[in-house]
Image (cartoon, grey):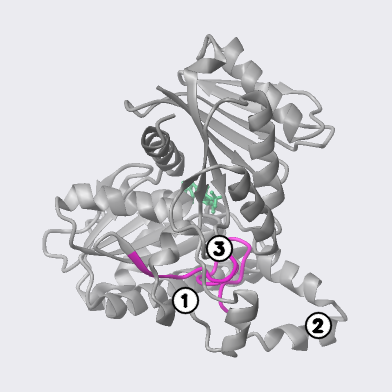
Amino acid sequence: MKILCVNAGSSSLKFQLYEMPEEKVLINGYIEKIGEEDCYWTIKKNGEKIRKEKHLKNHTEAAQVLIEELLENKVVESLDEIKGVGHRVLHGGEKYSKSTIITEEVIKDIEELTKLGPLHHPGNLAGIRSLQKELPNTPMVAVFDTAYHQSMEDVSYIYPVPYAWYEKYGIRKYGFHGTSHRFIAHEVEKLLGRKEYNLISCHIGSGASLCAIKDGKCIDTSMGFTPLAGVMMGTRSGDIDPSIIPYVMEKEGKNVGEIIDDLNKNSGLVGLSEYSSDMRDILSHSDDGDEKTILARKKFVRRIVDYIAQYYVLLGGCDIIVFTAGIGENSIPIRREICEALNVLGVQIDLDANQKRSEFVKLSTDESKIQVYVIPTDEELMIARDTVELIRNGNY
Ligand code: ADP
């Protein structure tokens, strides 16, 4: 059965077509700069990459291109072969703790939740609507980035602010990257061959979050009401003292939106280093001795170690730590520096094993008190699996 996965952002649309249950990727594509003159897309099929350029006005035109590419590349002969479409959606609020078949009610809820995901939901919704136009009879599924974290208890998700803020405005920790952390939990369950385990999942890409997982369930996670919270990231600050905001507003004559923009786009690695948000640049520039970049690198590692230490205690010990996403899968020195700081917990890694990139690999030695692995994440596959499961259960 063929399943299409769609991740539509404000100006981009990523897609992947799977043959399920074999979990084979038949084609994938990435359409960028939708709405701009220099819009282009890349298609990957059988290891071959093709790039095309054409102005696409909106997501409707992008969805048309997606369908044309599937047909032109002969990965489907007729659109009826596509048995389901899974859409990545940022925010499911408190209502959605699982993926769900998209109905009119679900679309209304996603619209309503735009207040919590203002940067993502308009793109997510445009992706759903435009694919519904192209494939009107195909069941579609929404896979929420927040859903996995709904198992957190109130003591984890509540902020110590007036309780009425939670009741009136839904101010609480929601957490993000849930699909990735859930994928890692599934992999760990297979790896350990048991359902009982304490896992700290470290999704470290340009956006980064950690998740404390007990027996498959999220107990706590580092992102919060928005993806700005938690550890330091490529361009985001992560947790800071909120009193900094009005102070700098006054000093720089900026409004609150401009300061939040600084915290989202001009902080983290790029903010401290004043050089780059890309970890590859940070590594080479700090190795060359640039002081601000050295500080950025140290702070980046420190924030992750802080959270691992916190989750170690929360979980009552830890069986396994997993690194994933761009930096977690590829950045050898950052993994080494994090694990060195965890020596105190009995973590020991094999430096040769740590030379590997983008591979499922065990980093810890046999003497290590906590197992440490790199497991490449695959959110699209998780979306495809959820879509298959829901359309089967829904008798479509
Ligand atoms: P996102 O999906 O959040 O945009 P990614 O998971 O793709 O981010 O991660 C991007 C990050 O991964 C960048 O900081 C990039 O420098 C880092 N990265 C990718 N490859 C390497 C590498 N070989 N060494 C170090 N960092 C890498």
Which mark's residue is nearer the viewer, 1 or 2? Answer: 1
First in sequence: mark 1 or mark 2? 1
Q: Tell me which amino acid carries mark 3.
A: Gly
First in sequence: mark 3 or mark 2? 3
Q: Give me the residue at 56% from left, 32% from top.
A: 15
- Up-down: is 56 above or below 354? above
Mark 2 surroundings: few (<14), some (14-19) or many (≥20) residues within 10 A: some
- Up-down: is 42 above or below 182? above
First in sequence: mark 3 or mark 1? 3
Mark 1 surroundings: few (<14), some (14-19) or many (≥20) residues within 10 A: many
Q: Tell me which amino acid carries mark 1.
A: Tyr
Q: Tell me which amino acid carries mark 2.
A: Met
User: Residue 157 — which label?
Assistant: 1
Q: Which residue is mark 3?
A: 93
Q: Give me the residue at 53% from left, 71% from top.
A: 224
For the residues bearing labels 3 and 2, Cβ distance under 8 angstroms = no
Does 228 lie within the magenta span?
yes
Residue 181 percent coordinates (x, y): 39, 56
* Image quarter (top left, top right, bottom left or bottom right) of the N terminus: top left
Q: Which residues are magenta?
A: 218-239
For the residues bearing labels 1 and 2, Cβ distance under 8 angstroms = no
Which mark's residue is nearer the viewer, 3 or 2? Answer: 3
Residue 35 percent coordinates (x, y): 81, 37
Specify the quadrant of the image occupied by residue 370.
bottom left
Q: Give me the residue at 56% from left, 88% from top.
A: 163
Q: Which residue is mark 2?
A: 249
177 vs 141, nearest the viewer? 141
Magenta segment's dominant SS is loop
Residue 303 percent coordinates (x, y): 46, 74
How far, Cα to Cα, is label 3 from label 2?
Answer: 30 Å
Specify the quadrant of the image occupied by residue 118.
bottom right
